[in-house]
Image (spheres, rainbow, N blue to C red):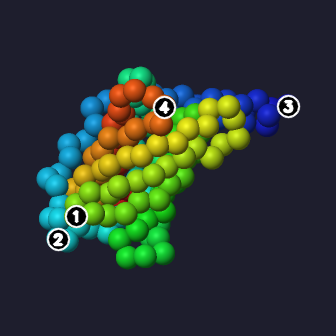
Amino acid sequence: MKKYRMFVILLLLLLLSACAGRGDPAEMAPPADPENPPALSGTYVINGFDPLGLEYGGHLTITPGDDDRTYQMQWIVVGGIQEGSGVVKGNQLWVEWRSIESSTDQAEGTAVYTITEAGQLDGVRFVNGMDGEGTEQAYPNQ
């Protein structure tokens, strides 16, 4: 029983830390040179607001795609998992994404991120069937 109680306490602490306010987001570096943007493979911490203005956070993993300048992406955010694919056009990453969790909250949409000199992503996200746009910033893990 003690192990179970400790597990529940640790799980609650992890959830609370994931939902805690993240404060002001880090400053974005200048946009990357469109002729030579940095590679994007790796893991990122994300902060964003959905089209309704609700704040979220999580992690993003980006892996190389099948073609040059393409990437596969997976977001783990409060409330679900999303996957997508993107292509680099100049210093922008154009993405199509969809939720993959098995729930009634299935969603899909697009996003366009500006790639910075530091490999950060600063963009807007759209959810099909919703008015407005959300914003999202992704910061590479060091």
Give the position of the N terminus as an image quadrant. top right
Which residue was labeled with disc 3? 1
Q: Quadrant of residue 42?
A: bottom left
Q: Residues within 10 Å of mark 2 (few under 14, many from 20)?
A: few
The label number, if any, that marks residue 129 in the structure image: 4
Identify the secondary structure beneath mark 3. Answer: loop
Q: Quadrant of residue 91 in the image?
A: bottom left
Seen in the picture, residue 132 relative to 96 is either above or below; the reply is above
Residue depicted at x 17% and y 51%: 29
User: Nearer the N terminus, badge 1 or badge 3?
Assistant: 3
- Estimate the spatial distance between the alpha carbons at disc 3 and disc 2, rounded to whole Å: 60 Å
Task: Answer whether labels 4 and 3 touch (C-beta < 8 Å).
Answer: no
Q: Which residue is mark 2?
A: 35
Dot 4 falls on a residue whose secondary structure is loop
Instruction: Give 84 or 118, whichever is nearer the viewer.
Output: 84
Q: Amino acid at mark 3?
A: Met
